[in-house]
Amino acid sequence: MHIHKLCTSNDPAVKLLKFADDTTVIGLIQDGDESAYRQEVDKLVLWCSQHNLQLNTLKTVEMIVDFKKHPSLLHPLTISHSPVSNVDSFKFLGSIISQDLKWESNINAILKKAQQRMYFLRQLRKHGLPQELLVTFYTAVVESILCCLVWSSHKT
């Protein structure tokens, strides 16, 4: 099946982002009018049904970003009569996006992963591996998740 044939949004306030087998619906809800967003979700559900694809509502989440002092009350999202979980953050293409659109959750997750991998580097050093192999291990396993090449491009 060609993913580019997936339904697309005709509403400029709603975007469908597709990557591999993941689809993300992003809707701009103004003045509490969520009808365009709801219609696009319903359209996606219908398209999946017509193409014998089943949406996993257990893996489907909704995150609302609202910076108003008094956030709008929106109706809970349901897909095929199943409620969709509302979350404060979710992983999108490897990065954690949070409701406040800050990087703290993503940075903490990356640091935790790096610390876990540094443990293995310390174990290898304890067992007397040559420094050249330790550097190779660090570059491949730790530096790759820290994106050091992106932040320190002058080294390449």
Image (spheres, helix red, strand yellow):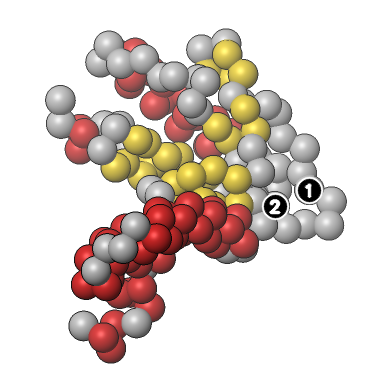
Residue at label 2?
A: 66
Residue in the foreground of this view, choosing between 68 and 150: 150
What residue sits 38% from the left and 48% below the top?
A: 93
Q: Position of residue 110 (x, y in %)?
A: 49, 58
Give the amino acid at mark 1: Pro
Quarter the N terminus occupies = top left
Q: Nearer the viewer, residue 139 or 132?
A: 132
Q: Nearer the viewer, residue 52 or 134?
A: 134
Q: From where the camera sits, is residue 70 visible?
A: yes
Instruction: Read off the residue under disc 1.
Output: 71
The Cα–Cα distance between marks 2 and 1, rounded to whole angstroms, is 6 Å
The quadrant in which residue 138 appears is bottom left
Q: Quadrant of the C terminus?
A: bottom left
**Residue at the image position 77 percent from the left and 37 percent from the top:** 73
> Of the numbered discs in the image, which one, if any, rests on residue 63?
none
Mark 2 and mark 1 lie on one chain; the one further toward the N terminus is: 2
